[in-house]
Image: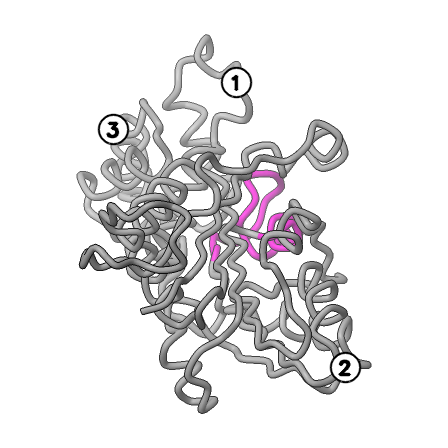
Amino acid sequence: MEFKHTPVMLEECIENLNIKANGIYVDGTIGGAGHSKEIIKKIGEEGLLIGIDRDEEALKSAKKTLEKYSNVKYVHGNHDDIKKILNDLEIDKVDGILLDLGVSSYQLDERNRGFSYLGDNKLDMRMDKTQNLTAEIVVNTYPEQKLADIIYEYGEERFSRQIAKNICIQRKTKKIETTKELVEIIEKSIPKLKQKNGHPAKKTFQAIRIEVNNEIEPLYKTILDCIDCLKEKGRLCVITFHSLEDRAVKKAMIEAKGNCTCPSDLPYCVCGAKSLGKIITKKPIIPSEKEQEENSRSKSAKLRVFERTKE
């Protein structure tokens, strides 16, 4: 299956990255290279694009999409390790970083990856197939209380305790191995009258996916690390798809902004407060109505932008 993923808020990201020719830019979630394809056009032959992804299939697709460009470095890794990745490449600071968080359209549509609650496939949900932890391990080995907490916190599922209880009852009889088996347990755990807003398994599958891929816990630090890796006037653009991600990104950007009391027209802080830069988006940018109509998966997306200022 071809790696296809419609880049969300493409124009908004390119505009807010404020791309300059010959610059160094990082796409920390390169995926099918939808965003990167536009970034590399703007940086020119003397610029450098660094494409990072946990999914080896995504990297293969990106290489194919960008095959005519020689100024790209591909890294099979995690954007959480941005500082180490740049250090290994002997790069100190970059001009811009883009993070498009969450699961890609390809990963959702490629049923055998186990991300989707549709169909009957092996419980996997790993973005990086080389890691050990899978959805099957989470579902079959985590204690009931921990399962309930994950489903409630990461999925914001009000019936988390009943779902976790029924999972644990079922796995005593038979190991839960497929997405269909898990969906059936979830459907039995939620009253029929409460199964009106979308698929009943959506929130639980999101929660387990987040746990398997450790998507939230390191995010706050990752944002601060990315900001620390920016040159003066370098920008970080982050697209989130649910409230947990967005809260972590917002909190980190506020922390990086600091409590500077200088007038906004000053080029850098003189009041003594430690500030790494400024938040460009006082309110997150959301997709246009047209984009939301054409790409339903963009509906929950939010874009936040931070600009590094002089240290």
Left or right: 145, with 123 as reference point = left
Q: Secondary structure at mark 3?
A: helix
Instruction: Measuring from the top left, give residue 103's x and y in whole percent.
Output: 54, 51
**Residue 222's image quarter?**
bottom left
Q: CA distance from mark 2 to mark 3?
A: 51 Å
- Residue designated by label 1: 197
The type of residue carrying mark 3 is: Arg
- Label 2 CA crowd tier, 10 Å (few <14, some 14–19, many 20+): some
Mark nearer the viewer, 1 or 3: 1
The type of residue carrying mark 1 is: Asn
The kind of secondary structure the magenta stretch mainly shows is loop
Vertical position of residue 108 compared to residue 302: above or below: below
Q: CA distance from mark 2 to mark 1?
A: 45 Å
- Residue designated by label 3: 161
Left or right: 132, with 303 as reference point = left
Residue 165 marker: none
Please name the residue shown 36% across and 23% down the image: 189
The type of residue carrying mark 2 is: Tyr
Instruction: Measuring from the top left, give residue 71's x and y in whole percent.
Output: 69, 85
- Label 1 CA crowd tier, 10 Å (few <14, some 14–19, many 20+): few
Highlighted magenta segment, given as a residue range: 104-125
